[in-house]
Amino acid sequence: QVQVVESGGGLVQAGGSLRLSCGVSGSILSVIAMEWYRQVPGKQRELVANIRSGDITRYGDSVKGRFTISRDNAKNTVYLQMDSLKPEDTAKYYCYADVFVRVGQSSGYWGQGTQVSVSS
């Protein structure tokens, strides 16, 4: 059993900041990569940022320069620092963990999501 749990969403004014956290726990050997996605009703889920071994990061074009992804390997936790928030950042944010569940076998798990709302 593997659990992915996000926290840190909420309501903030435009220009403000929020920090999301996501932890993965359970029967895993190691974390390969952790990713943040977001989705608004009626639209496809889009990649916000990801981080993988060696702290290699990638960001969606709409958040580059404003969001920062980082992780604490000891805690199997990833963070998303969101600065200079805009109303168009309003969405439900989901964490995805790509992990090794046994030697040579990987699997991916989604969290339940956390709502971020940015008022103008």
Image (cartoon, rainbow, N blue to C red):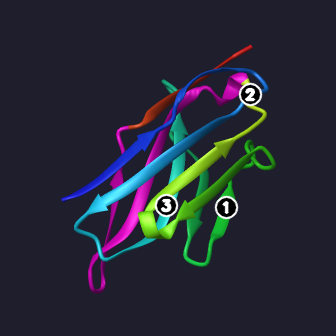
List the single residue furthest toward the front.
Answer: 74
Relative to residue 100, is residue 65 depicted above or below? above
**Earlier-in-chain disc, 1 versus 2:** 2
Depth check, mark 1 against mark 2: the one in front is: 2
| Disc on res. 34 | 3
Indicate the quadrant containing the N terminus: top left, top right, bottom left or bottom right.
bottom left
Q: Secondary structure at mark 1?
A: strand
Looking at the picture, does residue 30 appear above or below residue 40?
below
Q: Secondary structure at mark 3?
A: strand
**Residue 30 to residue 42: above or below:** below
Residue 36 in percent (x, y) is at 53, 49
**Residue 56 placement (x, y as % from top left):** 65, 71
What is the spatial separation of the Cα atoms under label 3 and label 2, in whole angstroms? 24 Å
Residue depicted at 22% across the width and 68% down the height: 27
Q: Secondary structure at mark 2?
A: loop
Q: Amino acid at mark 2?
A: Gly
Which of label 3 and label 2 is nearer to you? 2
Q: Is residue 15 magenta?
A: no
Dominant SS of magenta comes to strand
Q: Quadrant of the C terminus?
A: top right
How far is the residue under mark 1 from the one under mark 3? 11 Å
Q: Distance from label 1 to label 2 (Cα)?
A: 22 Å
Please provide the residue range marked out in magenta: 87-112
Q: Nearer the viewer, residue 106 or 71?
A: 71
Q: Position of residue 82 (x, y in %)?
A: 68, 40
Q: Tell me the residue that label 2 is attached to.
A: 16
Which of 14/40 is in front? Answer: 14
What amino acid type is highlighted by mark number 3? Met
